[in-house]
Image: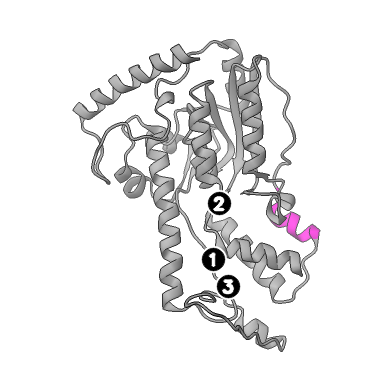
Amino acid sequence: MKSYEHVLAFAVEHPWNLTPSMLTVVASILARRVAGETIDAAELEAALVNRKNLPQPRQGSVAVIPVYGVIAPRMNLFSQMSGGTTYQELSKQIQEAIADKHVKQIVLDIDSPGGNVAGNAELAAEIMRARTKKPIIAVAQYTMASAAYHLAAAATEIVAAPSARVGSIGTFTIHNDLSEAMAKFGVKRTFVSAGEGKVDGNETEPLGASARVRLQKSVDEAYDQFVTNVVHGRGQGVCDEKVRGTWKAHLYGATEAKSIGMIDRIATLEQTLERLTDSPDAPRDARAALELTPLVDTPQGACASGQDRRGEAELERLAFEIAMMTS
């Protein structure tokens, strides 16, 4: 029971960049388990299973890093049972690929519904820095959603398999009102606390107004960071207004995702590896050295004008020259 309570506490305290369907799975499993129901490993795996995050062999000079299942800050129930991975493990693999002199390019093989906010923006920033040294290509085969898209947006290029689903740029948190379930099992919890708001939002009672405001603020902050990083990572005319007002938090098929600028090309993982292997010395992205700093100072919600984009291109060329000189 204690391990599930620990996971519940983590799930409630940290917002999620995750697809709505996986939200339902996560919330249902946690609510049922804390309410006293027994859920065995087979049922969890049937609900959350994804491909195992096994080490991938290098394809020539291309390092392949798998990003599968629910992504979490540390190995826990979700990553163990979903075949998912952790931000720490991904960071380690990226650093090793950057340090390996035999690796010329890095491919993120992504099949993930997203994951937790804790650690998401930090790894995105690390990928932005890493792409100043070696090209990083994110490939959706077959789901690249929410936290997974957050990471992909920081890459040099985004590719999606023809049947892939991409997007879900949104953030949520959960609150399970278990008061009726606990009453059913004869459990009545009493909190003795000090400090206003210390036990706000606890799962033994309906969500109060003040707790809802605090939770909404937490979600908004994480979402704002998500959008900002996508705008900076993608560049090429992508702006705050487009991400929030046009792309929204929807999932898109590969064709539509390409038409609206969420991805750069449509190809399978195998086709991408073949292309990169045939062109091992492909130039890095000119935007790479800009990392997570704004390309131009445009008002929030406004897309860059044609003149701004010309200035942006000049900055990109300068950044590329700096990256080449310091590599």
Which residue has dot 3 on it?
176
Q: Is residue 44 magenta?
A: yes
- The quarter of the picture where the N terminus appears is bottom right
Which image quarter: residue 58?
Answer: top right
Q: Which mark is residue 315?
A: none
Which residue corresponds to the image point at 54% horizontal and 26% vertical from the top-left? 136
Which image quarter: residue 184?
Answer: bottom right
Q: Position of residue 83 (x, y in %)?
A: 72, 46
The magenta-colored residue range is: 41-49
Figure colour scheme? one colour
Dominant SS in magenta: helix
Which residue has dot 1 on it?
174
* Residue 17 in sight from this viewpoint: yes
Which residue corresponds to the image point at 62% horizontal and 30% vertical from the top-left? 94
Question: Cβ–Cβ below 8 Å for labels 2 and 3?
Answer: no
Question: Cβ–Cβ below 8 Å for labels 3 and 1?
Answer: yes
Q: Is residue 201 above or below residue 151?
A: below
Regarding mark 2 in the picture, which secondary structure is present there? Answer: loop
Q: Which mark is residue 118?
A: 2
User: Which of disc 3 and disc 2 is earlier in sequence?
Assistant: 2
Side of 267 where 303 appears, left or right: left
Regarding mark 3 in the picture, which secondary structure is present there? Answer: loop
Q: Amino acid at mark 2?
A: Ala
Q: Residues within 10 Å of mark 2 (few under 14, many from 20)?
A: many
Q: Residues within 10 Å of mark 3 (few under 14, many from 20)?
A: many
Give the spatial CA distance, label 3 vs label 1: 7 Å
Q: Amino acid at mark 1?
A: Ile
Q: Amino acid at mark 3?
A: Asn
Regarding mark 1 in the picture, which secondary structure is present there? Answer: loop
Which residue corresponds to the image point at 51% horizontal and 76% vertical from the top-left? 200
